[in-house]
Image: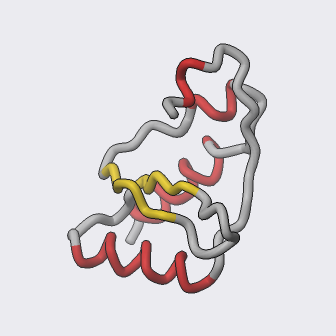
């Protein structure tokens, strides 16, 4: 389902397991991406999430404006770190 049809979405954070995190990082590396925004769908049986796609320039900063997690500051810190590397 497309989350954008919900005019009052609930946003928040969740943790992914270490194996999924490592696989996503490896995928970004293989694709030559310094960052990638991955769309995941939770598995109904509690198993690893399904990977739907990776966006090299995915949109996520709007989440903070919806009352979600602080994403602008960590992202800016990451960008500054990359600029000085």
Q: Nearer the viewer, residue 84 or 35?
A: 35
Q: Position of residue 40 (x, y in %)?
A: 51, 56
Left or right? Give the position of 2 relative to 35.
right
Displayed quadrant of residue 3: top right
Residue 52 locus on image (x, y percent): 39, 55
Question: Where's residue 85, x and y in %?
Answer: 38, 71
63 is higher (above) or lower (below) than 73:
above
Q: Nearer the viewer, residue 67 or 75?
A: 67
Q: Is residue 46 left or right of residue 21?
A: right
Q: Residue at x 22, y 70 (%)?
A: 32
Instruction: Please state the horizontal and vertical placement of residue 12, each as a whole percent of the image.
Output: 75, 44
Residue 60, above or below 26: above
24 vs 66: above or below: below
In the rendered view, does 17 fall on the left or right side of 34?
right
Q: Determine the residue positioned at 33% across, 49% down.
A: 55
* Residue at left offset 55%, top offset 18%: 5
């Amino acid at each position: 389902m497309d989350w954008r049809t919900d005019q009052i979405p609930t946003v928040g954070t969740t943790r992914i397991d270490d194996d999924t995190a490592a696989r996503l990082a490896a995928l970004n590396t293989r694709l030559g991406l310094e960052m990638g925004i991955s769309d995941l769908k939770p598995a109904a049986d509690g198993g690893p999430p399904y990977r739907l796609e990776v966006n090299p320039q995915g949109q996520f900063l709007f989440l903070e404006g919806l009352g979600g997690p602080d994403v602008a500051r960590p992202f800016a810190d990451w960008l500054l770190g990359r600029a000085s590397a």
